[in-house]
């Protein structure tokens, strides 16, 4: 039986307090279930932004999407998580990942490391954070019991194994890093590759007592009668890809409203994605899709 849908929006554009809170209220009005913030230099600081969002919303959950493990000492992160959960009234969800933008780590004076070193760092952060927050002696205490939900994002085998062991939410990107890029350049993976990654996660998670929620980050939403017009400019960014191949990518939702609704339903059936996150530029465009899928 499929999980009911949840929908999140990742707010990526910094803004003064009144403007920030206005778009958080708007996200709740549109029916989003989760307001999320990224963890990149040049964007908002995650925890104060979420606390500010909590002050003008009532229903939405509030999450990080996702924290760069190298930016956070586990003991200090535990303090941030517990405080933010208390100040948001127990609405916090914490997303963690390895980080993929080398230039940001350099600018922050922090080690980036090899892929293996970044996964090792993520594992240490997850395990130490869990241990600290699970301890009844830890102060401050988070509001949620038994724990603040944890999302782990990434597609590699070792990250999927970590998600299978620890995550309440397993987040897939639908893209991979370009080898050698220091700026975090990504290229989409094919539907078949995503099939394989989800299957690998399920294999690793086969012994879990309770299944995790599966999340997909959708990069672009366009409600339109001309799907090809959306895809054609993207062929310049993806040399060798045809318009048809681009329109088949799970991270792109383009077409008439009923077609997008059918695509989202089909992707839940195929991959198990019941929790979709869209980026801030797509917040308004995705709202009619969300309304059609509410409760399904």
Image (spheres, rainbow, N blue to C red):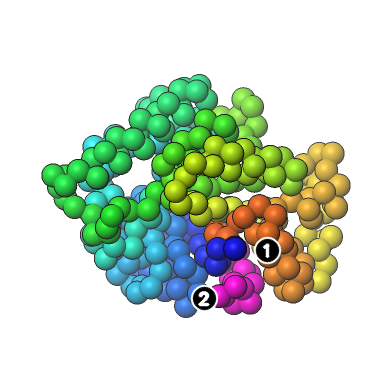
Residue 93 counted in the magenta span: no
In the rendered view, tell whether residue 130 sits above or below residue 267: above
Report crowding for label 1: few under 14, some 14 to 19, many 20 or more residues within 10 A (C-alpha): many
Report crowding for label 2: few under 14, some 14 to 19, many 20 or more residues within 10 A (C-alpha): some
Q: Which residues are magenta?
A: 282-296
Query: In which quadrant of the rendered view does residue 290 lie?
Result: bottom right
Q: Residue at x 42, y 74 (%)?
A: 25
In the shown orientation, is residue 45 left or right of residue 175?
A: left
The answer to whether one can see residue 211 in this image is yes
- Give whichever of 130, 180 is nearer the camera: 130
State which quarter of the image contains the C terminus.
bottom right
- Residue matched to label 1: 264
State which quarter of the image contains the N terminus.
bottom right
Task: Give SS at disc 2.
Answer: helix
Of circles 2 and 1, which is in front?
Answer: 1
Q: Position of residue 108 (x, y in %)?
A: 38, 32
What predominant SS class does the magenta segment belong to?
Answer: helix
Q: Position of residue 282 (x, y in %)?
A: 60, 63
Q: Which mark is residue 30?
A: 2
The answer to whether one can see residue 44 in this image is no
């Amino acid at each position: 039986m499929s999980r009911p849908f949840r929908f999140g929006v990742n707010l990526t554009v910094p803004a003064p307090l009144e403007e920030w809170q206005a778009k958080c209220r708007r996200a709740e009005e549109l029916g989003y279930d989760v307001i999320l913030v990224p963890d990149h230099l040049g964007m908002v600081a995650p925890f104060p932004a979420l606390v500010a969002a909590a002050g003008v919303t009532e229903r939405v959950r509030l999450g990080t999407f996702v924290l760069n493990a190298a930016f956070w000492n586990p003991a200090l992160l535990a303090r941030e998580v517990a405080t933010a959960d208390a100040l948001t009234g127990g609405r916090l969800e914490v997303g963690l990942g390895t980080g993929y933008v080398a230039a940001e780590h350099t600018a922050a004076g922090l080690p980036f490391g090899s892929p293996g070193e970044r996964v090792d760092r993520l594992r240490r952060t997850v395990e130490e954070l869990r241990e600290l927050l699970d301890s009844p002696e830890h102060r401050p205490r988070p509001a949620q019991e038994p724990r603040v939900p944890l999302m782990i994002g990434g597609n590699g085998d070792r990250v999927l194994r970590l998600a299978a062991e620890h995550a309440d939410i397993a987040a897939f990107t639908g893209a991979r890093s370009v080898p050698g890029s220091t700026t975090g350049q990504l290229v989409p993976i094919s539907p078949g590759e995503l099939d394989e990654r989800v299957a690998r996660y399920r294999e690793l998670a086969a012994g879990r007592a309770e299944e995790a929620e599966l999340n997909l980050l959708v990069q672009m939403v366009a409600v339109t009668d001309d799907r090809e017009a959306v895809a054609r400019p993207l062929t310049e960014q993806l040399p060798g890809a045809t318009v048809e191949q681009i329109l088949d990518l799970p991270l792109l939702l383009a077409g008439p409203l009923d077609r997008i609704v059918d695509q989202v339903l089909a992707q839940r059936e195929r991959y198990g994605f019941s929790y979709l996150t869209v980026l801030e530029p797509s917040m308004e465009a995705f709202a009619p899709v969300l309304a059609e899928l509410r409760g399904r």
